[in-house]
Image (tube, helix red, strand yellow):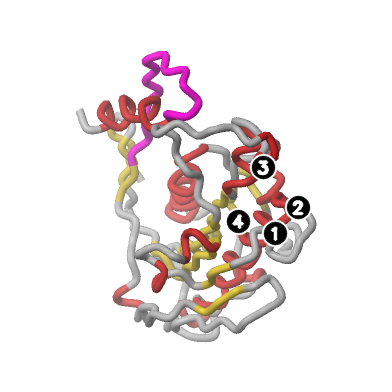
Amino acid sequence: MKNYNGNIVFEHSPRIAGYASVVGKKEGEGPLRDYFDRIIHDSYAGKDTFEQAESRMMSVAVQSALDKGHFSPADIDLACCGDLLNQCVASSFAMRRFGIPYAGIYGACSTMALSMIVAAVAADSGAARRAVCASSSHYCTAERQYRFPLEYGSQRPPTAQWTVTGAGACVIESEGGSDTERNSGEIGAYTNTASKDGAATASGNLPTLQNSAMPVIRAARLGRIVDYSITDQNNMGAAMAPAVVKMGT
């Protein structure tokens, strides 16, 4: 593993050996609906609060990623997970039932990418054979955290972003993570059944990957803070765009 001015190049190219996504009703009505593993139509996901619902989505996403890769929690050495809430409560409560060594990651919109970078560094260095990465957000929890609770009834300006209600997870595996150590060398399509949380099975055919076709992480680039003093809380795109442009130069 080498670092070239913020560009991390992995010597062994850790691979993605399992993945899953869980989304809310609005996301499930969009053009990507056939690619989600589970669509939860109830904003509360059968829980008492939106925060509990977000934690539930991450827990389901992580379990689905493990199932699709034919892993058990005992096969995972590290969990790199995060969300948008204080103290990463959604991810910490989601991961408590798995018993996997846990590192809370907070990167706001970059949390999933940052989690995968940290996990890939651990896998490439030999610190972990496998790591699970996960990130979540919920429109209702994010509005309460960063703007106004929905009950306040504030008007959204045209520039306001809509925080996704959903969670994603994947398993990063080192080159030395032998396929003989798990139940199968194939990642099969994950089939869901209806449940109390109002879940619906994705209607499309999810891809099945053989080991030779597993996506790999060859390199990663860490961004730098670029602050143009954007203070509009409803226009996060303008605040983040300068850093994206800077990364490409």
How many C-alpha atoms fall within 10 Å of the one at disc 4: few (<14), some, or many (≥20)? Answer: many
Of the numbered discs 4 and 3, the one sitting upstream in the chain is: 4
Image point (55%, 77%), residue name: 200
Label placed on residue 44: 1
Image point (47%, 66%), residue name: 28
Spatial CA span between label 2 and label 4: 28 Å
Q: For the residue marked with disc 2, what is the amino acid?
A: Thr
Label placed on residue 88: 3
- The mark lying in front, picked from 1 and 3, is 1
Image point (44%, 82%), residue name: 189
Q: Between residue 91 and residue 104, name the one nearer to us.
A: 91
- Magenta range is 221-235
Q: For the residue marked with disc 4, what is the amino acid?
A: Leu
- The mark lying in front, picked from 1 and 4, is 1
Label placed on residue 49: 2
Spatial CA span between label 1 and label 3: 18 Å
Most common SS among magenta residues: loop
